[in-house]
Amino acid sequence: MTDRHNWKPTLVAIALILLWIGYWYWGTLEAMAQIWWRSETYAHGLIVPPIALWLIWRDRQRPAALAPHATLWFAIPLAGFAFLWLLGDLTAVNALTQFAVIGLIVVAIMALVGWPISKVLAFPLLFLFFAVPVGDFLLPRLMEWTADFTVLALRLTGIPVFREGQNFVIPSGNWSVVEACSGVRYLIASLTVGTLYAYLTYTSLKRRLIFILVSLLVPILANWLRAYMIVMLGHFSGNKLAVGADHLIYGWVFFGVVIVIMFAIGARWAEPIQAAQRVTSAPGSKFQKPLHTWTIMLTLAVVIAAGSLYEMRLRQANTDVVINLALPATAGSWHTGAPAIEWQPRFTNPSAELHSAYRNQDGWVGLYIAYYQNQNYERKLVTSTNVLVTSSDPLWQIVANRQENASFGGSQMAIRQAELLKKQGIADERYIIWQGYWINGRLTSSDIEAKWLTAWAMLTGQGDDSAAIIIYAPKDSAAKDLPAFVNEAGGEILRSLSEARRK
């Protein structure tokens, strides 16, 4: 029989290593818990750790019958997660740092118990990753799919629809697909619960994976139907039903019914769960000496602390400097002046920002620059809260997005192009917007590339100075004026950004 007292050094080591991770990465853990508490989308994170502990306790006889054997080679993936956390913290990406900390917890436990026991505990440990509040990056795509399906279904029903972006008009009123209509809450909830259900209901990997796939697809389809049904309820009730907050209530009721049906159907193919069999140590296996466990734990502790310590060193080296952000008064045939319209991009807490217009004899072009330095979670360039227009803006809205190639300062790059519409007023007032990022002298329009360039600049000691460059013009003249402006003024703008950082 297994001597259960041999688990005591390992359990103590696990407790100490978890406290050690909490000490060095408390800020990340606290930020994650705050998201669980305040966000309806990620509130399930509050119950993920208790569920993981319950799953381990439920099958405790299986790991208890095996001898824990701390394994040093787990320090390699542990170092990978520490580096991943470093990259996430340098670029202020919450999801990345939180994913990395969960990875540190999982791999550290696996390192202390050894590979055979890690295989037994694989699902409860991996289930912890559902605690990471990630999914907001899916919002634009899910919103677009929901709008596509709703408009198509309305037209097939015989209702005429005029669509512009995520907004559409039917004879009975106007509708918009906003963040709450994306279905990301249903998707995350269904995937989390569906994965747990698959593990508890089936024993074969094939059936588990099929049900997880179903739990991923069903909420997307259900949300499409929900959106269509809400519009139809509003249409046939003269906009008395399913409008305002109550359509969210209808949505959750509908989603609950769909999930219950999905589980009921899945139960038809349930596989009997066999009683846990007694597991004995492999012949010839020996219990590990406690000294070896403590030695490996100390090694893991050094690796865990390395990410946070190196981040502190980089932050100290990236000292504050005076930002002298100034744009040229003239650039070729263009002369600066006051902004031409009462619109400005919504960028939060920039270190410096400028907004002006450039005019020539034929027209005008607006220019907005938001400059960021010493970025953190409250002040960062690339974030979901930095947008051209907020979804709740009463005056402006974005009705189209695409990519456009442009020559900026002599360099060809892909520019994000958006169409801005003024919702109020008699005239059809529209503007074309070009948007890109300047990251320590490098140009890009990709959020992901901007993050990686920022992380690389920090790791190589160049600092994290970055800026958003936004140029816009009236739609009827944008095809001519925007390329002309970036050809003439692009070099001067880049030179001004490079010279803005002065000690």
Image (tube, helix red, strand yellow):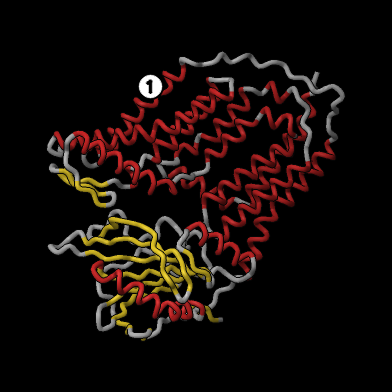
Residue 250 percent location from the top left of the image? 27, 33
Q: Nearer the viewer, residue 58 or 86?
A: 86
Q: Nearer the viewer, residue 306 or 457?
A: 457
Residue placed at 64% from the left, 50% from the top?
Answer: 23
The residue that mark 1 highlights is: 261
SS type, badge 1 = helix
Q: Residues within 10 Å of mark 1 (few under 14, many from 20)?
A: few
Residue 169 percent location from the top left of the image? 18, 47
Q: Which amino acid lies under the numbered mark 1 shown in the image of this protein?
A: Ile
Residue placed at 69% from the left, 15% from the top?
Answer: 277
Q: Work out whether 476 lies above or below 153.
A: below
Q: Work out whether 388 lies above or below 137.
A: below
Q: Nearer the viewer, residue 120 or 299?
A: 120
In the picture, measured across the screen, residue 94 lies left or right of residue 459, that is left
In the picture, measured across the screen, residue 303 lies left or right of residue 146, that is right
For the N terminus, the quadrant is: top right
Residue placed at 85% from the left, 28% from the top?
Answer: 286
Q: Would residue 389 be seen by someone viewing this image from the given angle?
A: yes
Residue 212 percent location from the top left of the image? 50, 29
Which picture quadrant has residue 369?
bottom left
Residue placed at 69% from the left, 22% from the top?
Answer: 62
Q: Work out whether 348 lies above or below 226.
A: below
Q: Nearer the viewer, residue 470 or 475?
A: 475
For the C terminus, the quadrant is: bottom right
Q: How many marks?
A: 1
Residue 434 percent location from the top left of the image? 36, 66
Q: Would residue 242 be seen by someone viewing this image from the given angle?
A: no
